[in-house]
Image (cartoon, helix red, strand yellow):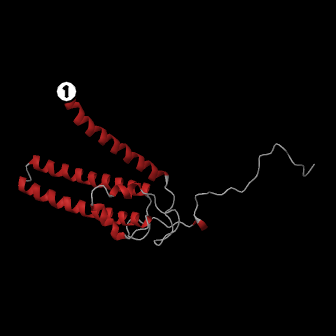
Amino acid sequence: MADIHNPYAPPAAAVADITAPKGDAFQPVKIFGVKGRVGRMRYCAYMFAANVISQTISAIIGAAVGFGAVAGGVTRAEMSTFSLVIGVIVGLPTLIYYILVTIQRGHDLNMSGWTALLTLIPLVVLYWMFAPGKPDANRFGAPPPPNSTGVKVLFWIGIFFVAVAIISIVAAIVIPAMNR
């Protein structure tokens, strides 16, 4: 009874991941560089995270400046100058980060990094957000790795906030019009 075939045993088969690229080669994600590729979900999640971080830092510094103005230690002119300087200090690194990630997203679309300048045209950034990247290696390297759970959660949180903003804007327009 050593080698009897069981007709009720589950089938045995070699199953591989059908989405894995040839050779299972992914390139690492480099958030602070122009080399490499970033997929559309990771692109949206990283942009959302950078925006949240930038806005949080600006709000904290703005609250500190406001507190200084209320306490009487800062004049209105000094507050304006300080706000401008802080805006540049926080905004410039954020802008540079946006550019770096957008260049990598262009690489995923098999486009030169210079095409990231097209996102300055209104609504063109929607192409960067919704167009699928090339699934295989292209001239910019291997495909990006699959999205982690953290990237997926951050993406859906960003989508939730965008949906709430759109609903709020529509409600702000529709409700007063209905009360006339």
Tell me which amino acid carries mark 1: Asn
Q: Is residue 14 visible?
A: yes
Residue at 33% over, 45% down: 162
Residue 164, compared with residue 88, is above or below; it is above
Residue 17 locus on image (x, y percent) = 62, 57
Q: Residue furthest bottom?
A: 139
Residue 85 locus on image (x, y percent) = 16, 61
- Does residue 44 appear to the left or right of 176 in the view shown? right
Residue at 6% over, 52% down: 76
The residue lying toward the viewer, choosing from 135 and 68, is: 135
> Badge 1 is on which residue?
179
**What secondary structure is found at the residue carrying circle 1?**
loop
The residue lying toward the viewer, choosing from 8 and 121, is: 121
Residue 27, compared with residue 9, is above or below; it is below
Residue at 40% over, 58% down: 43
Q: Quadrant of residue 25?
A: bottom right
Residue 179 locus on image (x, y percent) = 19, 26
- Does residue 5 appear to the left or right of 85 in the view shown? right
Q: Residue furthest top?
A: 179
- Does residue 141 appear to the left or right of 90 in the view shown? right
Image quadrant holding the C terminus, namely top left
The residue lying toward the viewer, choosing from 85 and 41, is: 41
Residue at 49% over, 54% down: 148
The residue lying toward the viewer, choosing from 105 and 26, is: 105
Q: Is residue 94 visible?
A: no
Residue 59 locus on image (x, y percent) = 23, 50
